Image: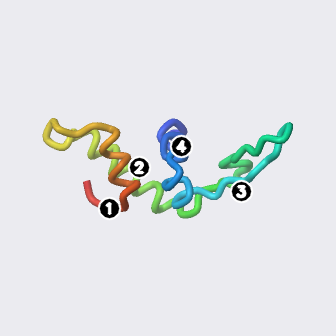
Amino acid sequence: MMYDPLTVLAGVDSLREKMFAPVDFEVDGVIHQVIGVSAVQHGVKNSAYVTKQLVTRFLGAIRLRGGRGRLGSVILEIEEGREEV
């Protein structure tokens, strides 16, 4: 599994709510959201959906959409709910 791209997705509030189910832990009065506390409690709501989104966006970024694409625009397309690159 590629963790860095998942971390980017989890860092966007709307995507985190759509794709992940974090577990809250309190440490010294501060709430921390943890995604993936175990193999069973992995924190991914729909792994097929997340996988499809990652593969689609990676391919779109590689193609660079005719030389005009940027990673930021690829992530925003997921956030805005557009399914195609």
Q: Secondary structure at mark 1?
A: loop
Task: Pinpoint residue 63: horizontal percent, then vertical percent.
Answer: 21, 41
Secondary structure found at label 2: helix
**Structural distance between the alpha carbons of marks 2 and 4:** 15 Å
Q: Amino acid at mark 4?
A: Gly
**In the picture, residue 71 is in which quadrant?**
top left
Say the numbered circle drawn on residue 11: 4
In the shown orientation, is residue 20 left or right of residue 54?
Answer: right
User: Looking at the picture, which amino acid does disc 1 mark?
Assistant: Glu
- For marks 2 and 4, the one nearer the N-term is 4
| Type of the residue with mark 2 | Leu
Q: Amino acid at mark 3?
A: Gln
Display colour scheme: rainbow
Residue topped by disc 2: 54
Query: In the picture provided, is 13 more to the left or to the right than 51?
Result: right
Q: Earlier in the sequence, mark 1 or mark 2?
A: 2
Q: Nearer the viewer, mark 3 or mark 1?
A: 1
In the image, taking residue 53 as reference, residue 47 lies left or right, namely right
State the SS at label 3. loop
Res 79 → quadrant: bottom left
Image coordinates for residue 31, horizontal then vertical, percent? 76, 45
Q: Which mark is residue 41?
A: 3
- Mark 1 near mark 4, Cβ–Cβ under 8 Å? no
Q: Would you name the residue on which mark 1 appears?
A: 83
Distance, label 1 to label 2, CA atoms, is: 11 Å
The disc placed on residue 37 is none
Query: What's the distance in space between the residues labelled 4 and 3, CA to CA?
Result: 19 Å
Q: Secondary structure at mark 4?
A: loop
What residue is drawn where x is 86% and y is 37%?
Answer: 28
Asked if disc 2 and disc 4 are in contact, CB closer than 8 Å, the reply is no
Mark earlier in primary sequence (1, 4): 4
